Amino acid sequence: MTSTNSAKSGPPGASPSVSYWQQPPDPIADLRSSSDLPQDVDLVIVGSGISGSSIAHHLLNEKPELKIVMLEARQAASGASGRNGGHTKTATYRSFLENVQEVGEEDAVKVSKLEYDCMVAVHDFIKQQGMDCDAKQCDTVDIFYDQGHLDEAKIAVAKMEKLIGPSHPCSHHTFYTPEETRKNFFCEDSLGSIKYDAGSLSAYKLTVGILKLALEKGLNLQTTTPATSITKQASEHGKSTWTVSTPRGEIRTPTLVLATNGYTAHLYPKLQDVIVPFRGVVTAQRPGSSVAHQGDLPTTYSFVYKEGYEYMITRPAIDLPSTTTPATNGTSTFTTTANLSPNTYDIVIGGGLTKTANQGSGEFHTIDDTSSSIPSSIIDYLNTTPADFFGAANWGTDHALGRIKHVWSGIMGYSADGHPLVGPMPGEEGLWIDASFQGHGMVLCWLCAKAFVEMLLGRDGTELKTWFPDCFRVTEERLGKRFSGRLVGREIGEAQTVNGFDGN
Ligand SMILES: Cc1cc2nc3c(=O)[nH]c(=O)nc-3n(C[C@H](O)[C@H](O)[C@H](O)COP(=O)(O)OP(=O)(O)OC[C@H]3O[C@@H](n4cnc5c(N)ncnc54)[C@H](O)[C@@H]3O)c2cc1C
């Protein structure tokens, strides 16, 4: 099956589903730092997700004198960063063999190290700043229900150990037998599992926290202000100037940064089919009685089967406002009512991509993240999965209010080779991009933003080369690669493009 939908990438929609994390919205959600848009600034960043926020933060830390405006089409941090699964998980063993083949050993090793280092750096930063992000560093476990994926995992881990060695923790993994998996992770009927370092957090609170630091340093944030077009003019001094049009007026700048992830091609059509939007669905659920009696689960999880996967974290339960819009779907009986009788923790589980009638191909090329557009087949499937994966005895009886507490969706940005695009746009003086973080932004964006700022400040030298993978840079060759297939059987965001995949 190929993803042949040729719909053009559009701007962020006006009425997105409200995510679990955005309840309540932060006080800066609707901030406009000034009532008028500044007309001439040093730098414009389009997009207030973790990428745009981290760039603003890193840059203003070094150059507080810069006049920077950030444009956000909707509320602050209301793209993927405000509506994800909250997993800080690398899982690079699942893309490692492919990366070695496609970008070579050196870059494959750099990608694995960068994701691990980014995960640690994000958690360290949260601790240093004392940010309230519900952050937790813990182990994660991938439970396998497909022998092919398990066999490949063993080969990949052996290769990582050989090429990376024990000195870097990104190569550390522990395998468990089916019996050990049952005892340690409460999952029945698996073929085995693999454990490694990970964590979880509220990406919404993290992004808003980073934005607040940048605002303190002088960032001008303009929410509900979409950039509707960008145009380049040669200025009197022979240097290019970019004009960004919005419904509230125009801004001119010599340096324009697109941190627009899955929406980027809308503003810069050369990226049509180079960065493709992809909708993901996540649910927050009440655990069953027996699983709940374990207290909080000791690890985060992914469940890997032949044609797909789910990813799951747990976190302290929250009460949702009783005004939450009730969701309805064809066959399920859940309601997203208030949590009248609080469970001790909530399960946050996403995935189910392959459970639509078209096996998920319709989730690519869509920018619709409204509540009403979420496929009911995915919701129905996610409603059953945690109990199925844990097994009836481990799950126990359902909470009196049912399993699903809340459902939301969000738009990711996927590239043909599965890597982000970070740096100056070739042949376009003054235009920069930091986008396409697949389903791995929490372990990529912070350090990619750091590398981006190094490049922007003219420090693209030998130090950066020691840790930043060449395969993340924007090259004409990469801009020529069109996304013509879809990912299958991989953790969201792991780099594997299956061109012409026919569903078998
Ligand atoms: C459902 C879902 C689950 C996920 N789960 C995980 C997970 O568990 N772990 C993980 O690591 N990653 C996960 N991800 C991926 C992760 O959230 C992203 O990779 C990351 O948030 C990307 O951040 P960003 O800042 O680059 O993009 P975004 O957060 O999408 O920010 C881009 C911003 O640009 C704005 N924008 C776009 N166009 C315009 C315009 N024309 N004018 C003004 N503003 C504009 C958007 O409104 C948006 O706010 C998930 C993503 C989704 C959608």
Image (spheres, helix red, strand yellow):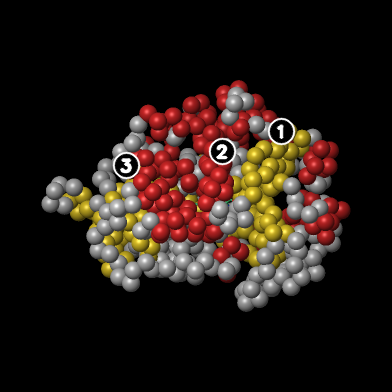
User: Is label 2 within 8 A of ligand 1 (CB to nearest ligand atom)?
Assistant: no
Give the labeled residue for mark 1: 174
Tell me what residue is drawn at x 77 percent, y 35 percent.
Answer: 176
Residue 457 numbered mark, or none: 3
Q: Residue furthest bottom?
A: 323
Q: Number of marks in the image? A: 3
Q: Amino acid at mark 2?
A: Tyr
Tell me what residue is drawn at x 41 percent, y 59 percent.
Answer: 216
Tell me what residue is drawn at x 27 percent, y 54 percent.
Answer: 42
Q: Nearer the viewer, residue 252 or 358?
A: 252
Q: Secondary structure at mark 2?
A: helix
Vertical relation: 74 (above or below) 117: below
State left or right for residue 329 relative to residue 79. right
Q: Nearer the viewer, residue 24 or 1?
A: 24
Q: Amino acid at mark 1?
A: Thr
Q: Position of residue 299 (x, y in %)?
A: 71, 46
Q: Position of residue 99 (x, y in %)?
A: 52, 32
The answer to which quarter of the image holds residue 154 is top right
State left or right for residue 206 relative to residue 8. right
The answer to which quarter of the image holds residue 68 is bottom left
Tell me what residue is drawn at x 74 percent, y 47 percent.
Answer: 298
N-terminal of the pair, mark 3 or mark 1, is: 1
Q: Position of residue 18 (x, y in %)?
A: 56, 67
Crowding around mark 2 (Cα neighbors within 10 Å: few <14, some 14 to 19, many 20+) is many
Residue 116 numbered mark, or none: 2
